[in-house]
Amino acid sequence: MPPILYSFRRCPYAMRARWALLEAGLLVQWREIALKAKPAEMLAVSPKGTVPVLVLPDGTVIEESLAVMEWALAQADPRGLRNTGDASALIEQNDGAFKHHLDRFKYTDRYPGTNKDEQCASGLAILQSWNQRIADQGWLLGEHCSLADAALWPFVRQWRIADPERFDNDNTLEDLHHWLQRFLEDPRFERLMQRADPWSTGGQQHHFPADAIAVPLDQPLFHLALKADWQAAQASGSYRISTRGMTLEQVGFIHCSWQEQVRDTFVRFYADAGEVLLLEIDPAAMNAPLRADAIPTGELFPHLYGPLPLEAVRSVVAMTAAA
Ligand SMILES: N[C@@H](CCC(=O)N[C@@H](CS)C(=O)NCC(=O)O)C(=O)O
């Protein structure tokens, strides 16, 4: 059985954990909770009563959002979120000072004696320092999206929601606006924010992501590869092409097909690609997560969230329009 995730849709801590699960290609049993009526099953394994909580099949309980992210990215980190610098100082600043100001700016009434303008100014100073980093490097820690970016953006989104007009019109935050927009416009955002009624014992068990299914391990998978890419993989020992002209690192997974999907994929993307090979892959021989995700039409395609082990390829044949 997949791990169990206790989650709350709008909680920024739960959002960062779910984002990492999406990145890593994992599928979990999703138990949406109401903060005012936490399930006894959750409190039994994590009495502190905060979400997210992830319960692994061996009973291990992970009850801090960052630990869930770390666990997920240890299973698979196809875009290399953890390869870009040390995220700890920024995450500490976010979870400490920034969250403090965010709560007091957003919910001033709950904190008697709080001056909203002061909280706004203090939070803004932190946001401006992040804006500067993004202006200088592209992302918070460098040229690529990192663990820090993935862990912080749900909190910046919350700040924006407290006063969208003020945030959007603040031209000291221009680079941060674009940075946040990249997450909000990412196709994964909609999947992250899928809705479910609160879970109850014996009730319907959804999975997260709700549009995904586990890939059966007894049906072969197929991947169309350019001959030159496959030859390069023999030399380097690892195949890391997602689809025609795009790498695993760029896309986040390797596109695969089930048998009945191969022909359409070939006609749509590879018909004019020169020498194309059809790889038949044993799904049971993977060492990275496999998940079938829905494309916008609703059709499910199997995706491999890591490099393709060469030994998992059972056969290689030339693919032609007539084949
Ligand atoms: N340090 C925890 C904080 C999680 C947290 O505070 N979550 C909030 C929801 S956003 C919560 O569950 N609060 C409990 C409540 O409101 O009863 C983590 O990173 O996972």
Image (cartoon, helix red, strand yellow):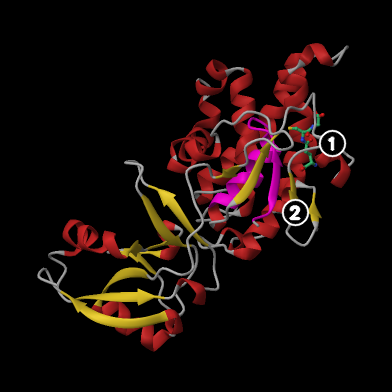
Badge 2: how crowded within 10 Å, few (<14), some, or many (20+)?
Answer: some
Badge 1 marks a residue whose secondary structure is helix
| Residue picked out by circle 2 | 67
Identify the residue shown where x is 73% and y is 59%. 57
**Quick one: SS at disc 2?**
helix
**Image quadrant of residue 310?**
bottom left
Residue 85: x and y in percent read 63, 60
**Image check: 124 left or right of 292?**
right
Contact (Cβ within 8 Å) of mark 2 with mark 1: no
Residues in magenta?
2-22
Residue placed at 58% from the left, 53% from the top? 27
- Nearest the viewer among 33 and 82 is 33
Q: Could you say which disc has been placed on residue 106 in the image? A: none
Q: Is mark 2 within 8 Å of ligand 1?
A: yes
- What is the x, y in percent for residue 235? 38, 88
Q: CA distance from mark 2 to mark 1?
A: 22 Å
Q: Give the amino acid type for the residue marked by disc 2 in the picture.
A: Ala
In the image, 316 versus 178, the foreground residue is: 316
User: Looking at the figure, which quarter contains the N terminus?
Assistant: bottom right
Position of residue 180 relative to residue 66, above or below, is above
Does residue 261 lie above or below 306 as drawn?
Answer: above
Coordinates of residue 51 in the picture (x, y in percent): 76, 39
Residue 59 colored in magenta in the image? no
Can residue 149 be seen?
no
- Classify 37 as above or below 1: above
Q: Which residue is mark 1?
A: 40
